[in-house]
Image: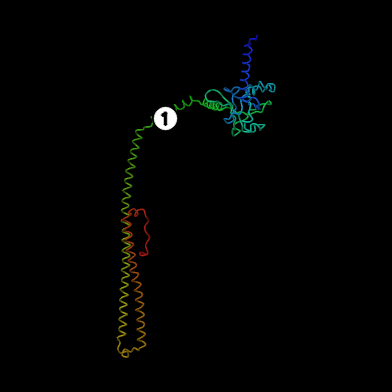
Amino acid sequence: MSREPNYFNIGLFLLTALLLLVVGVVVFGTGAVGAKKIYMESYFDESIQGLSVGSPLKYRGVEIGRVESIDLASKVYNSQLKDNQINKYGKYVRVVTAVDPQSAPESLIKKDDLSETNLRVRVTAQGITGISFLDVDYFTPAEDYPVLEYSWEPEYKCIPSTESMMNSFLSKAEDIMKEVSKVKFGQISSELNALLSKTNKAVDDTRIEKLSDNFIALTDDLTNTSETARKLISDLDISLKEGQLKSLQDSAIDTLEKIQDSAGEFDKGIASFDKLCNNANELLDIEDVEAENVTVPELLQQLRDTLIQIRTMAASNSRSIEKLIDNSKRLTDKLNETAEKINQQPSTVIFSNPPEKSEVLK
């Protein structure tokens, strides 16, 4: 006769096997077995709301570990704190993290004293869910992110921390509000009201309508003065034009008189030339040299002298003729140039300097 199976024992065995299977999957799935972890700790002088055990530790967005424990530093290192240090360091929060050496950067693993680097860790909010994680990154310059002081010997390697972005923003906002609270708005308002009252009184005491009338009268006077000055300049322009034209006319008359003198001298030269020619003819017309008591050598000498005088006179008169023609040409060109300039630019008569005497007028 066969025995009946014990269903209780069978059920207990199945439940135990299932539990072991789940534990194995969890342990091996998370890499908790066979993976060497490096423990590090950090201290925060602020609230770490949203951070809990198991929260990720990330390096520039890459997960390199997780939070293992969160405690107050004064509880863990109470034996190393003196009475006068409890108030200073007792508010620090100690966070221990397990770092995966295969994922973490070498500078975090190999460097013994991380306070000598710009590497810092801070609490970072993950969206609007209220959950936070630890973010490791390089912050420069290092002077703007000082390392928290502590007096105990850390159990693990310490990663220096810096305040979170939200806490930094709130600190700056609080500083601004403190400065704003120092401003005496009531006193400023009173002084501003007093200034406005004095300004209104000054405006009322000033006769605006009278000032406006005086300003209009002054504008009219300036307009009349401007018209008078414009008319005076116009009259002066006409006078200067007439004066310069008269000066040019006088200069032209002087030049013409010189031309007439040159012409008179030319006429005298022509008369002398005619006289010499007549003398030469008379010498050549002598038929009886002996009757005139003139020897042939004397006759030839007189003829030679006469010819020399004729040649000299001709050369002198030739230069006079050339000079006369040149003076006449220069005078004509100068008169034409001046007349054209006055027609094109009448204002030059007022604003230009008197012209220098030309070579013709000197």
Outermost residue to the bottom: 290
Against 65, residue 259 (above or below) is below
For residue 120, which quarter of the picture? Answer: top right
Please tell me which residue lies in front, 107 or 4.
Answer: 4
The answer to whether any part of residue 92 appears in the image is: no
Q: Is residue 38 above or below residue 347?
A: above
Vertical order, 27 against 218 (above or below): above
Q: Where residue 232 sits in the image (x, y, percent)?
A: 32, 49
Q: Residue at x 67, y 27 (%)?
A: 156
Percent position of residue 9, x then y: 64, 12
Direction from residue 61 to residue 223 in the image, left or right:
left
Secondary structure beneath dot 1 equals helix
Residue found farthest to the right? 79
Front residue of 131 and 184: 131
Residue 341 drawn at (x, y percent): 33, 57
Kindly indicate the quadrant of the structure image that contains residue 306: bottom left
Pick the quarter of the image with the C terminus. bottom left
Q: How is the image coloured?
A: rainbow
Give the residue type at disc 1.
Thr
Q: Label 1, on which residue? A: 199
